[in-house]
Image: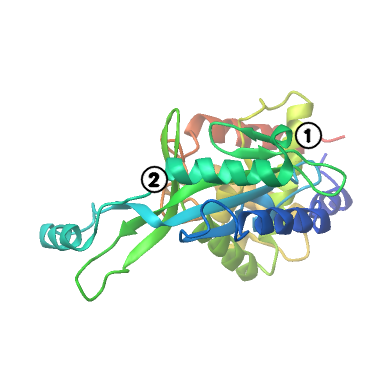
Amino acid sequence: MAIPESQLDTWSHRGSVTQSSDTYQTIRRALLAEDSGYADRTFEVFLQGSYGNETNIYSESDVDVVIRLDSTFHYNLDRLSEPEKQAYRSYVSPATYSCEQFKAAVIAQLQRRFGASSVSVGSKAITIKGDQSRREADVVVCQEYRNFKSFNSVRTTDYVSGIIFITPSGAIINYPRQHAANLTTQHQATANMLKPMVRILKNMRSRMVEDGLLGDGIAPSYYIEGLFYNVPVSEYVSTSYGETFCNGLNWLRKADKTKFACANLQYWLLGNSNVQWTTEKCDAYLKALVSFWNNWQ
């Protein structure tokens, strides 16, 4: 039995907005304070993740904040010619301030503002506990990552700007701003259907995990966003979430999955790197979706 449109409509709604916005603004003010230990450095504070992408659901409304050090950065010159690489190396100067120093100063600032007991440092992010006035939030401390497309002494900014941070399992390089911008562009092209559909898929994922149809951690939200980002605009039906779900799922199952792109358009969605979804997990998620839809009662 197909899932009723009324249930899909309920799942399409956003989770916390006002409290998430207040949480972000509170953390942003703390990070931008002029008396921090890194205030004299060049850095940016911005959102990433489900709340920032407007795909957050009620059971998944924590706030993900990025603080990115820009005054020192990592770079990739693989796409440059040898003369371009030589020109770049002559242009750039050695860093005098490390991301480790920056992260230590950010941790100290957050502990000073929210209290040491409310701030815990993980392998990927700093978690700030929620309270009555704010939601739990994760702060990712990172550096800018510049993926150069070309370089010469006149044109020095022809690169894709991302983030890089180091974990025990290696460096993670990603492009949250491009992910968010491309997701919004596709959302608008689908008559504002993409983001509600992603929220429906996330709610389905949560129910499938609760019901034992899907293992926890098989389908992270980031990859669900990327998966449906690949569904062509022609498969969307602006008057029906149910038809759009069926069209999209059928298209995804038949398509060449090796050509699925991450929403940031910098990586293939499926693969074995630490920023890709494995084919096995994607297939398990799609199989569970079919079963969940067909056996709804």
Residue 207: image tag? 1
Q: Nearer the viewer, residue 221 or 193?
A: 221
Where in the figure is residue 285, as x and y percent of width and height?
62, 34
Kindly report the distance in space between the C-alpha atoms of the residues bearing marks 2 and 1.
Answer: 43 Å
- Residue farthest to the front, as pictured: 35
Mark 2 vs 1, N-terminal side: 2
Question: Residue 251 vs residue 143: left or right?
Answer: right
**Quarter of the picture holding the N terminus:** top right
Q: Quadrant of the C terminus?
A: top right
Identify the image quadrant of residue 111.
Answer: top right
Residue type (three-letter) at the residue carrying disc 2: Ser
Residue 292 position within the rendered picture, expressed as x and y whole percent measured from the top left? 75, 34
Q: Circle 2 is placed at which residue position?
A: 98
Return the residue nearer the eye: 19 or 16: 19
Q: Residue at x 79, y 26 (%)?
A: 211
Foreground disc of the pair 2, 1: 2
Identified at 53% across, 58% down, the residue is: 39
Q: How many numbered marks does the figure carry?
A: 2
**In this orientation, does residue 150 appear?**
yes
Q: Say above or below: 118 vs 265.
A: above
